[in-house]
Image (cartoon, rainbow, N blue to C red):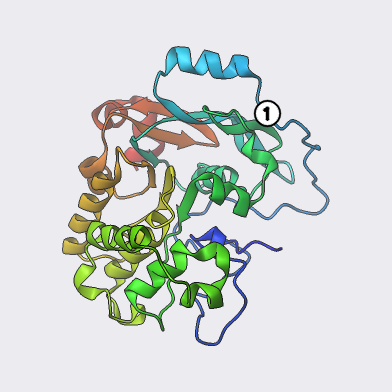
Amino acid sequence: MPPEPNSARASLADAPPSEKVSPEEVPTKEPRISTVTDISTKRPRSSKPPERTSQRVPKERGVEIRAARQHALLCVDNISVSFDGFKALTNLTLILDSGELRCIIGPNGAGKTTLMDVVTGKTKPDTGHVFFLEDMEDLTNLNEHQIARRGIGRKFQRPTVFPKHTVRENLELALAANKGVFKSLFHRFSKEQSERIDHVLGTIGLMDRALVLAGGLAHGQKQWLEIGMLLAQNPRVLLVDEPIAGMTHQEIEKTAELLRSLKGEHTVVVIEHDMDFVRSIAEKTVTVLHEGQVLAEGSMDEVQSDPKVVEVYLGE
């Protein structure tokens, strides 16, 4: 079944088309990101990656990572991606800890979008692995929907919601996504599932808008709803791409509060260009990418004072 490239809800992609249930944004074959100029993730037909047969990463690699990072959850290990000779990522390794909030920054073309495409299965790497430390399964052998079911959710910059359905119905569709749209609409939710939806509504601050059509929400509220649709599926890792684009100052503050509230229960990765916003949410580690590699990692103060970072990004 063909994937829906730009939906934050990969598990909803297999829903049959319906005149009533149509996403607000029509998916296209390219990432719907207007301000990031990472090279396209569409691989030319003439450039095929080598066949990948390994299903498990050697346990020794997991032991090595655990020795250095006791709370490591997900590892992007020595990933390389090239497009018709252009190296988008080169031997990139990124380790995420359980429950952390990680910010990833870098100039346009640094490889941020390609990195997220690899983690979610949209792009297959030439070399390297992506795996959870608990089972060492190589996620690069799975498709987007399989990876989503393993617990990785992605939210793109532009919100994609079902505008002709209420906020609560959007969350219900996300929660029962594997049943298909029609069955989801008439699915009888258990008490536990209904409480889960109530919890998500409270988390994203839309409890008082639960019965409002999603199409009537403000821009920031649509962003929060889409985050909520991911949270309804309880992902272990949540990837968020430029969450504050087009928001008002008040919406930005609420978004920062929301993302901070998710850490601990979820591992949250935020890609953002607004340095003031990054500083407001960054915790222990900020990762700086440049030319497909990790240029620097550390606290926000550390990376901002790094001469290499200042030269290629922050000093623009």
Q: Quadrant of residue 13?
A: bottom right
* Image location (x, y in percent) of residue 285: 33, 30
Q: Quadrant of the C terminus?
A: top left
**Residue at 44% across, 59% down:** 35
Q: Position of residue 273 (x, y in %)?
A: 35, 49
Q: Pick out the residue farthest to the bottom.
A: 19
**Residue lying at 27% horizontally and 63% vertically, measured from the top left:** 198
As rendered, which of 157 and 274 lies closer to the eye? 157
- Vertical comparison of 279 with 212: above or below: above
Q: Is residue 282 above or below residue 246?
A: above
User: Is residue 283 left or right of 135 when viewed as pictured?
Assistant: left
Which is nearer the eye, 65 or 88?
Answer: 65
Residue 87, visible in the rendered structure:
no
Q: Is residue 26 above or below residue 195?
A: below
Type of amino acid at the residue the image marks with label 1: Arg
* Residue 104 in sight here: yes
Quadrant for the N terminus in the image: bottom right
User: Who's the residue at 18% across and 56% down the image?
Assistant: 253
* Picture coordinates of residue 103, whole percent (x, y): 35, 40
Which secondary structure lies at badge 1? loop
Q: Which residue is mark 1?
A: 56
Vertical order, 131 against 193 (above or below) = above
In the image, farthest residue toward the right: 46
Q: Position of residue 194 (x, y in %)?
A: 33, 64
